[in-house]
Amino acid sequence: MRHPVLTALGLGAAAGVGALAWAHLETSMYTLREVSVPVLPPGQPDLRILHISDLHLTPSQEGKIAWVRSLADLQPDLVVDTGDNMAHVDVLPSLEFALAPLLELPGAFVMGSNDYFAPSFKNPARYLQADARIGRSVEPTPLPADKLAATMTAAGWKDLTNRRDTVVADGRRISLVGVDDPHLDRDEFPAPVPASGATSDLRLGVTHAPYTRVLDQMHEDGSDVILAGHTHGGQLCLPFYGALVTNCDVDRGRAKGLHGWPGARPDAAGGEDSTWMHVCAGLGTSPYAPVRFACRPEATLLTLTAR
């Protein structure tokens, strides 16, 4: 008869292998989330925003490329890309092909760290630190962020790298404010612009990483909705518990999905002084950690409705 301890060890090892295999498989289970946000002025028709983030694309990911291209079939009124698009030094042509149908629509973007620098192997235990940026030792490999930005702006998308802009979507004027990647400490919140007399139907804040200092600035600036990515929704989550980490200083409860900032959701009791915030769990992972668990890769279609 086999010893009970050996049996238990064998079952544990098998369960671990099975969980790892599932976590790798889950990285290709692309999911479209649909969320309703009651934020528009009374009487306005719905406005649909497609929020994409954290593609971490490599040239070989043909399934992801096809799925991203198919999102244009949704015909959103506006597309917002919150960064970390690239995960390979030679991926720009593949990325441009993936985004091409979306670039025909009104859009806006900010960059993330993996638009500026290629990913490198890291000790996974670093992400359990209060600040995962501590302990960097590898000289990063530059990525063609400038060429990606040129492609997006040439298509008419608004570059919100530490700047403000406006976009017209479905006949509505949307005021935009964005920052460069806070995870790299590149964020410099743009100064207010003088009043011009033009009114906006919506004020949108855009950042790659939802660091609290930036969320506070956007809330104080009057953003109606804040869009962010970066967290991967925790990437490795536990059922009934959620994300283990966020890789920034936002709390685990806001690792993904629709929330209020700084307090409860604005539609909840006591949440009148909060701003809507949506954190997209993103579509990819680092090629050095190609796993997700209880956190499928996603893009989100936000339907903004009248309050």
Image: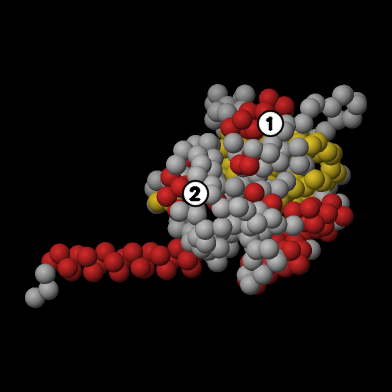
Q: Secondary structure at mark 2?
A: helix
Residue drawn at (72%, 27%) of the image: 221
Residue drawn at (55%, 24%) of the image: 270
Quarter-wise, where is residue 54 in the image? bottom right
Place of residue 23 in the rendered image (x, y in percent of width and height, measured from the top left): 45, 63
Q: CA distance from mark 1 to mark 2?
A: 23 Å
Q: Which residue is mark 1?
A: 218
Residue drawn at (62%, 47%) of the image: 229
Which kind of residue does numbered mark 1 sit on?
A: Met
Place of residue 99 in the rendered image (x, y in percent of width and height, measured from the top left): 75, 61
Total marks in image: 2
| Residue 152 visible in this rendered orientation of the protein | no
In the displayed structure, 286 sits above or below 126; it is below
Q: Secondary structure at mark 1?
A: helix
Residue drawn at (71%, 41%) of the image: 180
Q: Which of the two discs, 1 and 2, labels the residue nearer the N terminus?
A: 1
Left or right of 186: which side holds 289? left
Which kind of residue does numbered mark 2 sit on?
A: Gly
Decide: few, some or many residues near mark 2? Use Cα within 10 Å; few <14, some 14-19, many ≥20. Answer: many
Q: The C terminus lies in which quarter of the figure?
A: top right
Place of residue 212 in the rendered image (x, y in percent of width and height, measured from the top left): 58, 32
| Res 234 label | 2
